[in-house]
Amino acid sequence: MRPLVGLFFVLLGWNAAAQAPPSPIWTPETVMRQAAERLPSVQVARALLQSAQAYAGSIGAQPNPALRLSAVRGVPVEEANALVFKFEVAGQPGLREQSAESAAEARSEELIAEKRVVALKTGQAFYSYWEKFNVQQVVDTRVQLAQELERSSYRRLSVGEISQNSYLRSQLELAKARADLVTARVEAEQARGLLNLYLGRGVEEPLPVEAASVPLLPSTNRPTATLPELQAGLAALPEVDALRHDAKSQDYQTELARRANSPDLMVQLYRDRFGPTDVQAVQVAINIPLWDWGTVAAEVGRREGLAEAAHARVAERQLVLEQKAMETWKRYQGALEREKILGEQATHFAKLSGDARRAYDANLMTLLEVFDVQSSFRQAVQAYITAQADVARAALEIGALRKDGFFEEVSRVQP
């Protein structure tokens, strides 16, 4: 991208090198990597993954054994005291384990997706701060120019070349420039504060960024994929995979509900009393449910509905992503066109603005004409800065819609 912003400041007499921010310079890659590991939402997603993995680690076991102890007055039954083992023989433990593992996979994909979302939000915040920071520099330059014009106007007023009204007009322009600088400074501070929050830093901490040209990630600089290629890869995004795993988990839960009336195997080691006794034995039994009063059918119906909804969410998410990809791609193409047009326009105004001040000193232009030229130039520069930031933000969004690239790398980093 052409470093026109730095050229504009030089043409306006602003020494970019003298006012360069101190090292180290923050870059989009730096802030995105840092936020992707520190933001609380990532910690929440990581904790949910750990919880799901712990649950999946043991939920596939058979039911716990039970020890039955009885205090009997009179003649005890043979199995008054027993150690009972229940075995689910219709595959229920395996289904529970498979369901839990699918849920854990879903939480893993959600953690990856959350890192990508955090990286995108932080990158967007970075470019918003870069935009506001550079706009503030433009407005600051406007104040310097207004001060110079005010001094020139005073000298010409002193020798009777201009009227008192013209001089007051220069003072008004200076006041407006200073007021606009306050607004620009506040907006830049707000953008910096938001970015600092994403980074876990104090909102007032300095955050130096490159001012000459908009910094872009190498992997997001001018995306080359076409819109159909971009949309074709949406099905592989982690947020879609998470929904697929959730749907698979619901399928296992549905099958588990259908087997609620399956027979169970019971193994019982028993004796009638404590102490010496002749009654002790091992019993193997099959527990066969006779019929369902409706609770099992109700649970099966509920699970079937949940599974159907889970599968529908996959298609719903893909549709949303396709719409987002189309909108982002069109916005990116439009931002590129605006950037080119505004860059050329700002270049033309740069020369006019540089000549206007000298023409005023030579009494070849009126004060209002100088104000008009500089105002047009200032607006062109600010519009070009915004266009550059729009291109960068749209490029980031396109990168976040791709499975590979920088976002994939960031999402896999572990703390």
Image: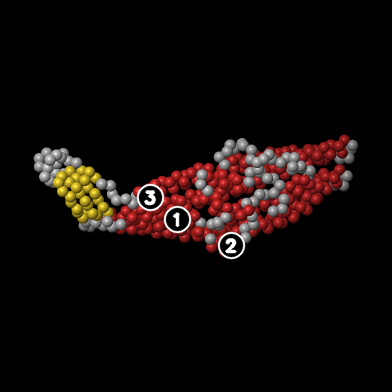
Side of 24 relative to 236 (left or right): right
Q: Amino acid at mark 2?
A: Leu
User: Who comes first in sequence, dot 1 or dot 3?
Assistant: 3
User: Who comes first in sequence, dot 3 or dot 2?
Assistant: 3
User: Who comes first in sequence, dot 2 or dot 1?
Assistant: 2
Instruction: Please give the label number shown on residue 56.
Output: 3
For disc 2, the neighbor class at 10 Å (few under 14, some 14 to 19, many from 20) is: some
Q: Position of residue 142 (x, y in %)?
A: 75, 42
Q: Residue at x 57, y 38 (%)?
A: 201
| Secondary structure state at the residue bearing disc 2 | helix
Q: Position of residue 14 (x, y in %)?
A: 76, 42
| Front position among marks 1 and 3 | 3
Instruction: Please give the label number shown on residue 227.
Output: 2
For disc 3, the neighbor class at 10 Å (few under 14, some 14 to 19, many from 20) is: some
Are the residues at dot 2 and dot 1 in contact (C-beta closer than 8 Å)?
A: no
Give the colour scheme shown. secondary structure
Q: Is residue 292 visible?
A: no
| Secondary structure state at the residue bearing disc 3 | helix
Residue where numbered disc 1 is placed: 243
